[in-house]
Image: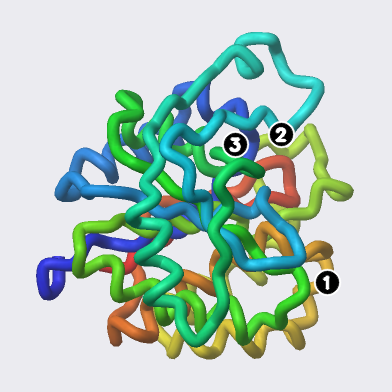
Amino acid sequence: MTDGRMPAVFVGHGSPMNALEDNRYTIAWSELAASMARPRAIVCVSAHWFINASAVTAMTEPRTIHDFFGFPPALFDMEYPAPGSPELAGQIVEVAAPLWVGLDHDSWGLDHGTWSVLARMYPEADIPVVQLSLDASKPHEHHYELGIHLDALRRDGVLVLCSGNIVHHLGKIDPSKPESGFPWAERFDTRVREIMTEGAPSELLGLRSHPDFPLAAPTPDHYLPLLYLGGIADAAGTKAEVVIDGYAYGSLSMTSLLVA
């Protein structure tokens, strides 16, 4: 890794069933983890902790949150008992300054945006993990700037995992398209990949005016984690690489990006 830094990853996490199923996405996540140095800790920016504040989990034993419904009992039975890290939580508060991040000692834990991916990357659950919330009250620029600040953690052996989906429109899901995307989904996903692999990461901030943005990101939660990776790439002065790409049910992008 450049300058000894740990990588940062954006993962299109898709269905929580990826925690249980072997498919080309989950196999790619496992292979990615095997190709990297072992991190001392992990911070995850998950689409599923979307609140009106910036907060980081600071408990020693974060609970596994089953934040979904309608799935098989085996998924609700699944636990990811990774330890937390109050030390890393405090470090995030420091590196984020002057942006404010609060310490969450008892409210949240690890939701499926985190554990469904980490269960495939690090199934032993023996690496400390903290989650960073998405502040729903802040504009895109805030999330991008916070990503810039998080880049400092990578020099201290911390893996930054940004978990969302570049395209995420549950209202447009088409079961007849299990492995393909609608044209608008492919156009938007392709544009993001062009920016991250060839252009300037700051161009992500202009995508709100892209004609396909309203369909690709009808709610901001799954899109915002991408901006953290953009900020990290900006701070590092490097391009991203595509770890895996693809689509699910027409309206979900499964693209994963790596910043080394």
Q: Give the structural element (helix, strand or loop) at label 2.
A: loop
- Residue 112 — which label? 3
Which of the pair 178/138 is nearer the observer?
A: 138
Q: Are marks 2 and 3 in contact (CB under 8 Å)?
A: yes
- Residue annotated with mark 2: 67
- Residue 214 — which label? 1
Residue at position x 18%, y 45% from top?
38
Q: Quadrant of residue 213?
A: bottom right
Residue 169 location (% of width, % of height): 79, 53
- Residue 44 — which label? none
Q: Earlier in the sequence, mark 2 or mark 3?
A: 2
Q: Vertically, is 128 above or below 159?
A: above
Residue ranking furthest to the left: 4
Alpha-carbon span between mark 2 and mark 3 = 7 Å
Q: Give the structural element (helix, strand or loop) at label 1.
A: helix
- Do we see residue 183 in this rendering? no
Q: Give the structural element (helix, strand or loop) at label 3.
A: helix
Which of the pair 148/54 is nearer the observer?
A: 54
Residue 108 location (% of width, % of height): 63, 43
Which of the pair 83/180 is nearer the observer?
A: 83
Q: Quadrant of residue 87?
A: bottom left
For disc 2, the neighbor class at 10 Å (few under 14, some 14 to 19, many from 20) is few
Left or right: 254 with respect to 221? left
Residue type at mark 3? His
Left or right: 217 with respect to 60? right
Residue type at mark 1? Pro
Q: Nearer the viewer, mark 1 or mark 2?
A: 2
Residue at position x 45%, y 32% from top?
61
Q: Are marks 3 and 1 in contact (CB under 8 Å)?
A: no
